[in-house]
Amino acid sequence: MTGPQFKQLRRAYGFDEVAIVPGDVTINPELVELGLEIGPHRFAIPFVASAMDAVVDPNFAIEMHRAGGLAVLNLEGVWTRYDDPGTILQEVAAASRDEATAILQNAYQAPIRDDLIARRIKEIKAGGAVAAVSTTPMNTKKMAGLVQDSGADILVVQSTVTTARHESTSLEGLRFEKLFKDIHIPVVVGNTVGFNATLEVMRTGVAGVLVGVGPGAACTSREVLGIGVPQVTATIDCAAARDHHFRETGRYVPIITDGGIRTGGDVCKCIVSGADAVMMGSPFAQTTEAPGRGYHWGMATPHANLPRGTRVAVGVNTTVQKLLYGPTSRTDGTENLVGALKTAMGMCGAHNVREFQQAEMVIAPAIKTEGKIYQFAQSGS
Protein backbone atom coordinates (compact mmCIF):
# COMPACT_ATOMS: atom_id res chain seq x y z
CA MET A 1 0.00 0.00 0.00
CA THR A 2 1.52 3.32 -1.07
CA GLY A 3 1.24 6.48 0.98
CA PRO A 4 -0.77 9.50 -0.13
CA GLN A 5 0.85 12.03 -2.46
CA PHE A 6 0.67 15.56 -1.11
CA LYS A 7 1.13 18.78 -3.04
CA GLN A 8 4.43 20.32 -1.96
CA LEU A 9 4.65 24.03 -1.21
CA ARG A 10 7.79 26.15 -1.32
CA ARG A 11 8.32 29.35 0.64
CA ALA A 12 8.10 32.60 -1.30
CA TYR A 13 9.28 36.01 -0.06
CA GLY A 14 8.16 39.61 -0.37
CA PHE A 15 10.01 42.86 0.30
CA ASP A 16 9.40 42.97 4.06
CA GLU A 17 10.85 39.49 4.64
CA VAL A 18 14.37 39.98 3.26
CA ALA A 19 17.34 42.29 3.78
CA ILE A 20 20.43 43.20 1.77
CA VAL A 21 23.82 42.39 3.29
CA PRO A 22 26.48 45.16 3.06
CA GLY A 23 29.55 44.33 1.01
CA ASP A 24 33.17 43.80 2.00
CA VAL A 25 34.09 46.95 0.08
CA THR A 26 32.18 50.24 -0.03
CA ILE A 27 32.33 52.96 -2.66
CA ASN A 28 31.09 56.54 -2.85
CA PRO A 29 27.56 56.77 -4.30
CA GLU A 30 28.70 59.30 -6.92
CA LEU A 31 30.84 56.54 -8.48
CA VAL A 32 27.78 54.38 -9.10
CA GLU A 33 26.51 53.95 -12.66
CA LEU A 34 22.79 53.46 -13.26
CA GLY A 35 21.04 52.79 -16.52
CA LEU A 36 18.61 50.63 -18.44
CA GLU A 37 18.73 49.45 -22.04
CA ILE A 38 15.66 48.37 -23.99
CA GLY A 39 16.61 47.58 -27.56
CA PRO A 40 18.57 50.55 -28.90
CA HIS A 41 17.23 52.90 -26.22
CA ARG A 42 19.28 53.71 -23.12
CA PHE A 43 17.83 55.43 -20.07
CA ALA A 44 19.86 57.13 -17.35
CA ILE A 45 17.93 55.54 -14.48
CA PRO A 46 16.22 52.13 -14.16
CA PHE A 47 12.77 53.53 -13.36
CA VAL A 48 9.66 53.02 -15.48
CA ALA A 49 6.23 54.59 -14.88
CA SER A 50 3.31 52.17 -15.24
CA ALA A 51 0.92 52.24 -18.18
CA MET A 52 -2.03 53.42 -16.14
CA ASP A 53 -4.35 56.30 -16.96
CA ALA A 54 -3.96 58.01 -13.59
CA VAL A 55 -0.17 57.92 -13.93
CA VAL A 56 0.89 58.55 -17.53
CA ASP A 57 -0.40 61.00 -20.09
CA PRO A 58 1.74 62.51 -22.88
CA ASN A 59 2.91 65.37 -20.65
CA PHE A 60 3.93 62.98 -17.88
CA ALA A 61 5.82 60.83 -20.40
CA ILE A 62 7.80 63.89 -21.45
CA GLU A 63 8.58 64.85 -17.83
CA MET A 64 9.68 61.30 -17.04
CA HIS A 65 11.99 61.32 -20.06
CA ARG A 66 13.54 64.58 -18.90
CA ALA A 67 14.16 62.96 -15.51
CA GLY A 68 16.10 60.14 -17.19
CA GLY A 69 13.49 57.38 -17.01
CA LEU A 70 10.70 55.94 -19.13
CA ALA A 71 6.91 56.25 -18.92
CA VAL A 72 4.49 53.94 -20.73
CA LEU A 73 1.17 55.24 -22.08
CA ASN A 74 -1.87 52.95 -21.96
CA LEU A 75 -3.31 52.86 -25.49
CA GLU A 76 -6.55 51.27 -24.28
CA GLY A 77 -7.41 53.92 -21.73
CA VAL A 78 -9.09 57.29 -21.64
CA TRP A 79 -6.28 58.99 -23.59
CA THR A 80 -7.27 57.11 -26.76
CA ARG A 81 -11.03 57.22 -26.18
CA TYR A 82 -11.57 60.95 -25.57
CA ASP A 83 -10.11 64.10 -27.13
CA ASP A 84 -9.95 65.64 -23.66
CA PRO A 85 -10.30 63.11 -20.84
CA GLY A 86 -10.19 65.82 -18.18
CA THR A 87 -13.93 65.64 -17.50
CA ILE A 88 -13.78 61.85 -17.07
CA LEU A 89 -10.80 62.06 -14.72
CA GLN A 90 -12.53 64.70 -12.62
CA GLU A 91 -15.68 62.57 -12.42
CA VAL A 92 -13.64 59.56 -11.26
CA ALA A 93 -11.87 61.68 -8.64
CA ALA A 94 -15.15 63.11 -7.34
CA ALA A 95 -16.94 59.74 -7.09
CA SER A 96 -17.48 57.90 -3.83
CA ARG A 97 -15.57 54.68 -3.32
CA ASP A 98 -18.68 52.62 -4.07
CA GLU A 99 -19.39 54.55 -7.29
CA ALA A 100 -15.86 54.72 -8.70
CA THR A 101 -15.63 51.32 -10.40
CA ALA A 102 -19.00 51.68 -12.13
CA ILE A 103 -17.99 55.14 -13.42
CA LEU A 104 -14.73 53.71 -14.76
CA GLN A 105 -16.55 50.82 -16.43
CA ASN A 106 -18.89 53.25 -18.14
CA ALA A 107 -16.06 55.58 -19.22
CA TYR A 108 -14.12 52.73 -20.82
CA GLN A 109 -17.08 51.71 -22.99
CA ALA A 110 -16.29 54.52 -25.43
CA PRO A 111 -14.48 53.11 -28.49
CA ILE A 112 -10.70 53.34 -28.91
CA ARG A 113 -9.92 55.71 -31.77
CA ASP A 114 -7.06 55.17 -34.21
CA ASP A 115 -6.63 58.92 -34.68
CA LEU A 116 -6.08 59.39 -30.95
CA ILE A 117 -3.53 56.55 -30.83
CA ALA A 118 -1.51 58.33 -33.50
CA ARG A 119 -2.03 61.74 -31.87
CA ARG A 120 -0.85 60.67 -28.41
CA ILE A 121 2.28 59.02 -29.78
CA LYS A 122 3.09 62.12 -31.80
CA GLU A 123 2.52 64.35 -28.75
CA ILE A 124 5.09 62.35 -26.79
CA LYS A 125 7.56 62.44 -29.67
CA ALA A 126 7.03 66.17 -30.12
CA GLY A 127 8.20 66.65 -26.54
CA GLY A 128 11.47 64.90 -27.34
CA ALA A 129 10.67 61.76 -25.34
CA VAL A 130 10.93 58.08 -26.17
CA ALA A 131 7.37 56.99 -26.95
CA ALA A 132 6.57 53.75 -25.13
CA VAL A 133 2.98 52.55 -25.38
CA SER A 134 1.03 49.62 -23.99
CA THR A 135 -1.63 47.29 -25.40
CA THR A 136 -3.21 44.07 -24.19
CA PRO A 137 -2.56 40.85 -26.15
CA MET A 138 -6.15 40.90 -27.41
CA ASN A 139 -5.59 44.18 -29.27
CA THR A 140 -1.92 43.92 -30.16
CA LYS A 141 -2.31 42.42 -33.64
CA LYS A 142 -4.87 45.06 -34.55
CA MET A 143 -2.87 48.01 -33.18
CA ALA A 144 0.76 47.04 -33.80
CA GLY A 145 1.03 48.39 -37.35
CA LEU A 146 -0.58 51.70 -36.42
CA VAL A 147 1.65 51.99 -33.35
CA GLN A 148 4.79 51.54 -35.42
CA ASP A 149 3.63 53.78 -38.28
CA SER A 150 2.78 56.55 -35.77
CA GLY A 151 6.38 56.62 -34.58
CA ALA A 152 6.28 54.70 -31.31
CA ASP A 153 9.69 53.58 -30.08
CA ILE A 154 8.72 50.73 -27.72
CA LEU A 155 5.61 48.55 -27.57
CA VAL A 156 4.63 46.97 -24.26
CA VAL A 157 2.24 44.01 -24.51
CA GLN A 158 0.80 43.67 -21.04
CA SER A 159 -1.76 41.48 -19.30
CA THR A 160 -2.19 40.07 -15.81
CA VAL A 161 -0.41 36.86 -16.84
CA THR A 162 1.55 36.42 -20.09
CA THR A 163 2.78 33.16 -21.61
CA ALA A 164 4.36 32.25 -24.93
CA ARG A 165 1.75 29.51 -25.45
CA HIS A 166 -1.92 30.38 -25.20
CA GLU A 167 -4.98 28.31 -26.05
CA SER A 168 -7.95 30.16 -27.48
CA THR A 169 -11.16 29.60 -29.43
CA SER A 170 -9.94 32.10 -32.04
CA LEU A 171 -8.26 30.78 -35.18
CA GLU A 172 -4.92 32.16 -34.05
CA GLY A 173 -4.04 34.03 -30.89
CA LEU A 174 -1.18 36.47 -30.51
CA ARG A 175 2.10 34.83 -31.52
CA PHE A 176 5.14 36.91 -30.64
CA GLU A 177 7.33 35.32 -33.31
CA LYS A 178 4.87 36.42 -36.00
CA LEU A 179 4.44 39.85 -34.43
CA PHE A 180 8.18 40.48 -34.66
CA LYS A 181 8.06 39.83 -38.41
CA ASP A 182 5.42 42.53 -38.81
CA ILE A 183 6.91 45.27 -36.63
CA HIS A 184 10.50 46.24 -35.98
CA ILE A 185 10.44 48.17 -32.71
CA PRO A 186 11.40 46.61 -29.36
CA VAL A 187 8.56 44.73 -27.67
CA VAL A 188 8.41 44.34 -23.88
CA VAL A 189 5.93 41.78 -22.55
CA GLY A 190 4.43 40.98 -19.18
CA ASN A 191 3.59 39.88 -16.73
CA THR A 192 5.35 36.71 -15.64
CA VAL A 193 6.46 35.32 -12.27
CA GLY A 194 8.10 31.97 -13.06
CA PHE A 195 11.26 30.52 -14.60
CA ASN A 196 9.72 28.41 -17.37
CA ALA A 197 7.16 30.94 -18.59
CA THR A 198 9.76 33.73 -18.60
CA LEU A 199 12.30 31.62 -20.49
CA GLU A 200 9.76 30.65 -23.14
CA VAL A 201 8.71 34.28 -23.61
CA MET A 202 12.36 35.38 -23.93
CA ARG A 203 13.01 32.74 -26.58
CA THR A 204 10.40 34.39 -28.83
CA GLY A 205 12.66 37.44 -29.21
CA VAL A 206 11.16 39.98 -26.80
CA ALA A 207 13.22 42.99 -25.71
CA GLY A 208 12.18 42.90 -22.04
CA VAL A 209 9.91 41.16 -19.55
CA LEU A 210 7.74 42.63 -16.78
CA VAL A 211 7.66 40.65 -13.53
CA GLY A 212 4.79 40.61 -11.06
CA VAL A 213 1.21 39.41 -10.73
CA GLY A 214 -1.09 41.23 -8.35
CA PRO A 215 1.19 43.22 -6.01
CA GLY A 216 0.13 46.70 -7.13
CA ALA A 217 -1.69 48.96 -4.70
CA ALA A 218 -4.72 49.24 -7.00
CA CYS A 219 -4.74 45.61 -8.14
CA THR A 220 -7.04 43.01 -6.60
CA SER A 221 -6.10 39.97 -8.70
CA ARG A 222 -4.70 38.22 -5.64
CA GLU A 223 -8.01 38.63 -3.84
CA VAL A 224 -10.31 38.00 -6.83
CA LEU A 225 -8.34 35.17 -8.45
CA GLY A 226 -5.98 33.99 -5.71
CA ILE A 227 -3.07 34.22 -8.15
CA GLY A 228 0.36 35.76 -7.55
CA VAL A 229 3.89 35.24 -6.23
CA PRO A 230 5.62 37.65 -3.79
CA GLN A 231 7.91 39.97 -5.70
CA VAL A 232 11.30 38.96 -4.31
CA THR A 233 10.80 35.31 -5.19
CA ALA A 234 9.17 36.16 -8.53
CA THR A 235 12.11 38.38 -9.48
CA ILE A 236 14.70 35.79 -8.46
CA ASP A 237 12.96 33.12 -10.55
CA CYS A 238 12.64 35.36 -13.61
CA ALA A 239 16.24 36.58 -13.27
CA ALA A 240 17.36 32.95 -13.35
CA ALA A 241 15.49 32.57 -16.66
CA ARG A 242 17.16 35.71 -18.04
CA ASP A 243 20.62 34.44 -17.08
CA HIS A 244 19.90 30.99 -18.52
CA HIS A 245 18.71 32.59 -21.76
CA PHE A 246 21.86 34.73 -21.90
CA ARG A 247 24.10 31.67 -21.50
CA GLU A 248 22.03 29.88 -24.11
CA THR A 249 21.95 32.64 -26.75
CA GLY A 250 24.29 35.47 -25.78
CA ARG A 251 21.27 37.83 -25.82
CA TYR A 252 20.54 39.73 -22.61
CA VAL A 253 16.85 40.44 -22.01
CA PRO A 254 16.24 42.88 -19.11
CA ILE A 255 13.57 42.09 -16.55
CA ILE A 256 11.55 44.87 -14.90
CA THR A 257 9.91 44.20 -11.53
CA ASP A 258 6.43 45.69 -11.77
CA GLY A 259 4.18 46.48 -8.80
CA GLY A 260 4.14 46.73 -5.03
CA ILE A 261 7.19 49.01 -4.85
CA ARG A 262 6.77 51.83 -2.33
CA THR A 263 10.18 52.82 -0.96
CA GLY A 264 13.83 53.07 -1.81
CA GLY A 265 14.38 49.87 0.12
CA ASP A 266 11.88 48.06 -2.10
CA VAL A 267 13.66 49.35 -5.20
CA CYS A 268 17.01 48.13 -3.91
CA LYS A 269 15.63 44.69 -3.02
CA CYS A 270 14.22 44.35 -6.53
CA ILE A 271 17.64 44.96 -8.06
CA VAL A 272 19.44 42.61 -5.66
CA SER A 273 16.80 39.99 -6.48
CA GLY A 274 17.94 40.28 -10.08
CA ALA A 275 15.84 43.04 -11.66
CA ASP A 276 17.34 45.38 -14.22
CA ALA A 277 14.73 48.06 -13.47
CA VAL A 278 11.51 48.71 -11.61
CA MET A 279 8.08 49.77 -12.83
CA MET A 280 5.94 51.80 -10.43
CA GLY A 281 2.41 53.17 -10.46
CA SER A 282 1.21 54.50 -7.11
CA PRO A 283 4.37 56.49 -6.24
CA PHE A 284 4.18 58.32 -9.57
CA ALA A 285 0.42 58.79 -9.22
CA GLN A 286 1.17 60.96 -6.17
CA THR A 287 3.14 63.51 -8.18
CA THR A 288 1.81 66.86 -9.32
CA GLU A 289 2.61 65.88 -12.91
CA ALA A 290 0.35 62.80 -12.88
CA PRO A 291 -3.15 63.23 -14.35
CA GLY A 292 -5.08 61.21 -11.75
CA ARG A 293 -5.83 64.08 -9.34
CA GLY A 294 -4.59 62.11 -6.34
CA TYR A 295 -6.27 58.85 -7.32
CA HIS A 296 -4.97 55.70 -8.94
CA TRP A 297 -6.48 52.61 -10.55
CA GLY A 298 -5.19 49.62 -12.45
CA MET A 299 -5.66 48.61 -16.07
CA ALA A 300 -8.07 45.81 -15.10
CA THR A 301 -10.25 47.98 -12.84
CA PRO A 302 -12.72 48.97 -15.61
CA HIS A 303 -13.19 45.35 -16.79
CA ALA A 304 -16.86 45.03 -17.72
CA ASN A 305 -17.46 41.62 -16.12
CA LEU A 306 -14.72 40.94 -13.55
CA PRO A 307 -12.88 44.08 -12.37
CA ARG A 308 -9.56 43.10 -10.80
CA GLY A 309 -8.65 46.41 -9.28
CA THR A 310 -10.00 49.33 -7.36
CA ARG A 311 -9.58 53.08 -7.26
CA VAL A 312 -7.26 54.05 -4.42
CA ALA A 313 -6.64 57.51 -2.96
CA VAL A 314 -2.92 58.27 -3.00
CA GLY A 315 -3.02 62.06 -2.70
CA VAL A 316 -0.83 64.61 -4.46
CA ASN A 317 2.19 65.16 -2.27
CA THR A 318 5.38 65.18 -4.33
CA THR A 319 6.85 65.85 -7.77
CA VAL A 320 8.63 63.60 -10.25
CA GLN A 321 11.91 65.36 -9.43
CA LYS A 322 11.55 64.97 -5.65
CA LEU A 323 10.33 61.40 -5.91
CA LEU A 324 13.35 60.38 -7.94
CA TYR A 325 16.09 62.78 -6.86
CA GLY A 326 14.97 64.70 -3.78
CA PRO A 327 15.77 66.74 -1.83
CA THR A 328 13.49 65.30 0.81
CA SER A 329 12.77 65.62 4.50
CA ARG A 330 10.81 62.36 4.61
CA THR A 331 12.29 59.58 6.67
CA ASP A 332 10.15 56.74 5.31
CA GLY A 333 12.06 56.16 2.07
CA THR A 334 9.29 57.35 -0.25
CA GLU A 335 11.30 60.13 -1.94
CA ASN A 336 14.76 60.38 -3.54
CA LEU A 337 14.54 56.81 -4.78
CA VAL A 338 17.54 57.25 -7.08
CA GLY A 339 19.60 58.51 -4.15
CA ALA A 340 18.56 55.53 -2.05
CA LEU A 341 19.54 53.13 -4.82
CA LYS A 342 22.95 54.76 -5.29
CA THR A 343 23.61 54.79 -1.54
CA ALA A 344 22.72 51.11 -1.14
CA MET A 345 24.87 50.19 -4.13
CA GLY A 346 27.77 52.07 -2.56
CA MET A 347 27.32 50.19 0.73
CA CYS A 348 27.52 46.92 -1.19
CA GLY A 349 30.51 47.99 -3.30
CA ALA A 350 28.50 47.76 -6.54
CA HIS A 351 29.63 50.03 -9.36
CA ASN A 352 26.62 49.26 -11.55
CA VAL A 353 23.26 47.47 -11.59
CA ARG A 354 24.77 44.17 -12.76
CA GLU A 355 27.15 44.14 -9.79
CA PHE A 356 24.35 45.06 -7.38
CA GLN A 357 22.37 42.05 -8.62
CA GLN A 358 25.15 39.89 -7.13
CA ALA A 359 24.88 41.36 -3.62
CA GLU A 360 23.97 38.98 -0.81
CA MET A 361 20.45 38.96 0.56
CA VAL A 362 19.14 37.17 3.66
CA ILE A 363 15.74 36.08 4.92
CA ALA A 364 14.99 38.60 7.66
CA PRO A 365 11.34 38.81 8.78
CA ALA A 366 12.28 41.16 11.65
CA ILE A 367 14.19 43.60 9.43
CA LYS A 368 11.57 46.37 9.80
CA THR A 369 10.73 45.82 13.48
CA GLU A 370 13.99 44.91 15.22
CA GLY A 371 14.92 47.69 17.65
CA LYS A 372 12.21 50.05 16.36
CA ILE A 373 9.97 50.22 19.45
CA TYR A 374 10.31 53.99 19.79
CA GLN A 375 9.40 54.57 16.14
CA PHE A 376 6.25 52.50 16.56
CA ALA A 377 5.37 54.32 19.79
CA GLN A 378 5.70 57.70 18.06
CA SER A 379 3.70 56.66 15.01
CA GLY A 380 0.88 55.46 17.25
CA SER A 381 0.71 58.59 19.35
Image (cartoon, grey):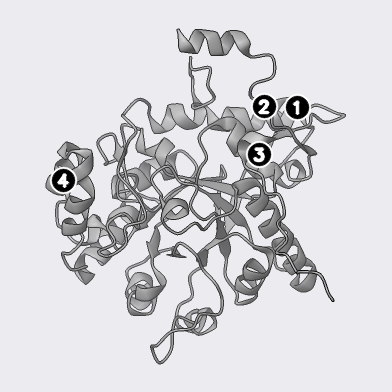
Name which residue lies at 75% across and 73% down: 249
Residue 135: image location, x then y, percent:
37, 66
Residue 97: image location, x then y, percent:
23, 40
Residue 39 in view in this figure: no
Q: 10 Å neighbourhood of mark 1: few (<14), some, or many (≥20)?
A: some
Q: CA distance from mark 1 to mark 4?
A: 45 Å
Q: In the rendered structure, are the residues bearing label 2 and label 3 in contact, judged by CB atoms less than 8 Å apart?
A: no
Q: CA distance from mark 2 to mark 4?
A: 39 Å
Disc number placed over residue 347 in the picture, else none: 1
Name which residue lies at 15% across and 64% down: 110
Kind of residue sitting beneath label 1: Met
Q: 10 Å neighbourhood of mark 4: few (<14), some, or many (≥20)?
A: some
Disc number placed over residue 343 in the picture, else none: 2
Q: Is residue 273 left or right of residue 148?
A: right
Q: Nearer the viewer, residue 379 or 114?
A: 379
SS under mark 1: helix
Q: CA distance from mark 2 to mark 3?
A: 13 Å
Q: Which residue is mark 3?
A: 269
Q: 10 Å neighbourhood of mark 3: few (<14), some, or many (≥20)?
A: many
Name which residue lies at 15% across and 48% down: 88
Q: Which residue is mark 4?
A: 86
Q: In the rendered structure, are the residues bearing label 1 and label 2 in contact, judged by CB atoms less than 8 Å apart?
A: yes
Q: CA distance from mark 1 to mark 2?
A: 6 Å
Q: Earlier in the sequence, mark 1 or mark 4?
A: 4
Kind of residue sitting beneath label 3: Lys
